[in-house]
Image: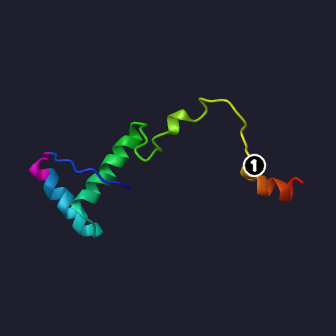
Amino acid sequence: MGLVRKQTYITTAQDRAVKRLAQQQGVTGAEIQRKALDLLLAREGIGANEHPFADLIGMFSGPSEVDHDDIYIKNSPMLSALFIG
């Protein structure tokens, strides 16, 4: 998981609550904030952990399955001679 540094302002009450929860759970305040953000995004139907290319799935046509071994064999003269004849 890559992390990006962000500076945000939270209320004093939020700060106290985050620190208390972090201490109870034995994690950092930043981890509590990341969990809270993940919950909000999930509730809003936004997948924060979704793969960045997920929207591309299904946009292109082609074979749904490819036997990669066949590709390597056909494109290699040595392997072609051994397996194809």
Image height of 14 relative to 64, above or below: below
Q: Secondary structure at mark 1?
A: loop
Residue at 81% across, 53% down = 80
Q: Can you give x and y, in whole percent of width and height, for residue 16 in the image? A: 14, 58
Image height of 37 relative to 81, above or below: above
- Quadrant assignment for the C terminus: bottom right
Q: Identify the main secondary structure in magenta.
A: loop
Q: Can you give x and y, in whole percent of width and height, for residue 12 in the image? A: 9, 51
Q: Can you give x and y, in whole percent of width and height, for residue 31 in the image? A: 28, 59
In the rendered view, does 80 fall on the left or right side of 65?
A: right
- Quadrant assignment for the N terminus: bottom left
Residue count near mark 1 (Cα–Cα under 10 Å), binned few <14, some 14–19, many ≥20? few
In the rendered view, does 7 fall on the left or right side of 47?
A: left
Residue at 40% across, 40% down = 43
- Give the camera-side residue of 5 and 27: 5
Image height of 21 relative to 63, above or below: below
Please give the count of numbered marks on the rendered protein: 1
The residue tagged 1 is: 67
Residue at 54% across, 34% down = 56
Q: Can you give x and y, in whole percent of width and height, for residue 37 in the image? A: 31, 47
- Identify which amino acid the numbered label 1 is placed on: Asp
Residue at 84% across, 59% down = 82
Q: In this picture, which residue range is highlighted in magenta?
A: 9-13
- Give the camera-side residue of 69 and 55: 69
Tell me which colouring the rendered structure shows.
rainbow
Q: Residue furthest front?
A: 77
In the rendered view, does 11 fall on the left or right side of 75?
A: left
Quadrant of residue 42 within the rendered picture: top left
Q: Is residue 32 magenta?
A: no
Q: Residue furthest right?
A: 85
